[in-house]
Amino acid sequence: MTNSWAVTNLGNASVLIEVDDAVVLTDPFFGRSRGISDVAALSPSQLPRLTAIIGSHWAQDHWEIDLLADYPHRDTTAVYVADESMADSARAVGFRHVETLAWGERRQLTDTVELEVVPEHVAADGMGTNNYAINSPGARIFFGGEVLAVDALENYAQTADAFDCAIGPVNGVLFKGRQLVTTAAEMARVAQIIGATRLIPIHDGHMPYEGLVTITSSAADLDNLELGDLEVTPLASGERFNH
């Protein structure tokens, strides 16, 4: 049994999560979104062979799956998403094993690694949003690319095992005055609620646009919070943390 795991920040909400023999890409982002300052760490051609791709949210800055039309392992890499529009776009570029998963569903990624869908919220347009847990006998990693529903996670945590690491958004971005994701303080609270001992902040590169996009927070705000035993591990684009 091993508790080895690693996280590489690829930009925006895209990370590579390695647990045991599973390699999972989240919310694929390759830098096409002009409203985000993050530099994509990898081009589609530089991706390793993936066990699975998981998508938390339908927006382009989370789901540039159409740029993977030439990814050579589309017949063996599973794709798990939050709504059918995301599934359709994955199938359109040739992925064969694509599923839209509901909250609470689980899928076995390898002999030792399981994917679990953790409740989040339904977006204002009616499309679903998913969080995910990647579980193995020695590690439990939380990923939420578009975390907002703190209450839903608090309810989930009442009957769930604690996590080793939480990965989630910290810029509290508003679109036309409507909050889309957690602030740094809210994401720190989420990490504490779910029992995580480490927080890796993501979703921190959006640029303000007058009258449309407002940024209310950043990872820097974590420095001013009382976090107790929660350790913050900021990663630059392309940087890898290995546990």
Image (spheres, rainbow, N blue to C red):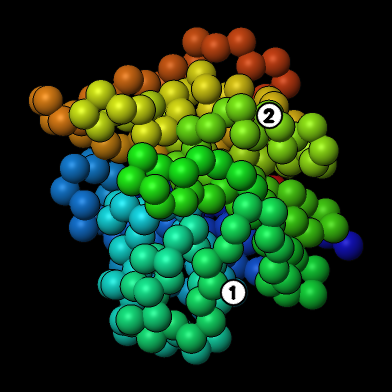
Q: Residue at x 54, y 72 (%)?
A: 99
In this view, 195 is above or below 58? above
Viewer-proximal residue among 49 and 88: 88
Q: Secondary structure at mark 1?
A: loop
Q: Position of residue 223 (x, y in %)?
A: 50, 16
Q: Residues within 10 Å of mark 1 (few under 14, many from 20)?
A: some
The tag on residue 183 is: none
Label 1 or label 2, whichever lies nearer to me, is 2
Where does residue 194 sit, x and y in percent of width and height?
A: 71, 33
Amino acid found under the numbered disc labelled 2: Glu
Residue located farthest toward the left when viewing the structure as drawn? 210
The residue shown at (36%, 40%) is 124
Residue at the location (52% across, 67% down)?
Answer: 100
Tell me the kind of residue under disc 1.
Thr
Tell me if I can see residue 9 in this picture.
Answer: no
Residue receiving disc 1: 51
The residue that disc 2 covers is 154
The relative height of residue 200 versus residue 132 in the rendered view (above or below) is above
Q: Residue at x 69, y 54 (%)?
A: 104
User: As displayed, is residue 174 above or below residue 223?
Assistant: below
